[in-house]
Amino acid sequence: MKKKKSKKNQTYSNLKDQKLGQTKNSAKIVLFVFGIGPIIGIIIFLYSKGFFTSPTI
């Protein structure tokens, strides 16, 4: 015989999936900010110091 899932169990499972989705999205945002942010900062710093300009002889 098949057992039916109770409604309480289904709503908890649905809520858990929703929280997991929010966690994944916030993790992606954090990785993007701390991964790409420093790279952009370094590029701006080097550009301001003249690193990307060609030297004139």
Image: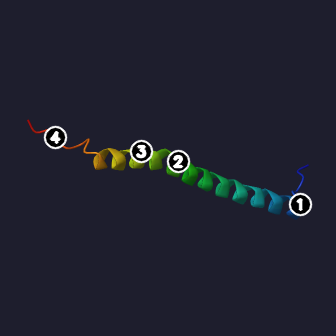
Q: Which residue is mark 1?
A: 6
Amino acid at dot 3:
Ile
The kind of secondary structure element at disc 3 is: helix
Horizontally, residue 20 falls left or right of residue 38, namely right
Horizontally, residue 16 falls left or right of residue 23, namely right
Task: State whether residue 24 is above or below residue 52.
Answer: below
- The alpha-carbon separation of the residues under discs 2 and 4 comes to 30 Å
Q: Residue at x 79, y 56 (%)?
A: 13
Q: Which residue is mark 2?
A: 34
- The alpha-carbon separation of the residues under discs 3 and 2 comes to 9 Å
Q: Marks 2 and 3: in contact by CB < 8 Å?
A: no
Q: Which residue is mark 4?
A: 54
Using a 10 Å C-alpha cutoff, classify the residue at mark 2 as few (fewer than 14 neighbours), some (14 to 19) or many (20 or more).
few
- The alpha-carbon separation of the residues under discs 4 and 3 comes to 21 Å
Amino acid at dot 4:
Ser
Q: Residue at x 10, y 39 (%)?
A: 56
- The alpha-carbon separation of the residues under discs 4 and 1 comes to 70 Å
- The alpha-carbon separation of the residues under discs 3 and 1 comes to 50 Å
- The alpha-carbon separation of the residues under discs 2 and 1 comes to 42 Å
Depth check, front residue: 25 or 29: 29
- For marks 3 and 1, the one nearer the N-term is 1
Q: Which residue is mark 3?
A: 39
- As drawn, the residue found furthest toward the left would be 57
Q: Residue at x 76, y 61 (%)?
A: 15
Nearer to us: label 4 or label 3: 4
- For marks 2 and 1, the one nearer the N-term is 1
Task: State whether residue 9 is above or below residue 32.
Answer: below
- Expressed as whole percent of the image width and height from the top left, the position of residue 27 reads 61, 50
Q: Which quarter of the figure has residue 16? A: bottom right
Nearer to us: label 4 or label 1: 4
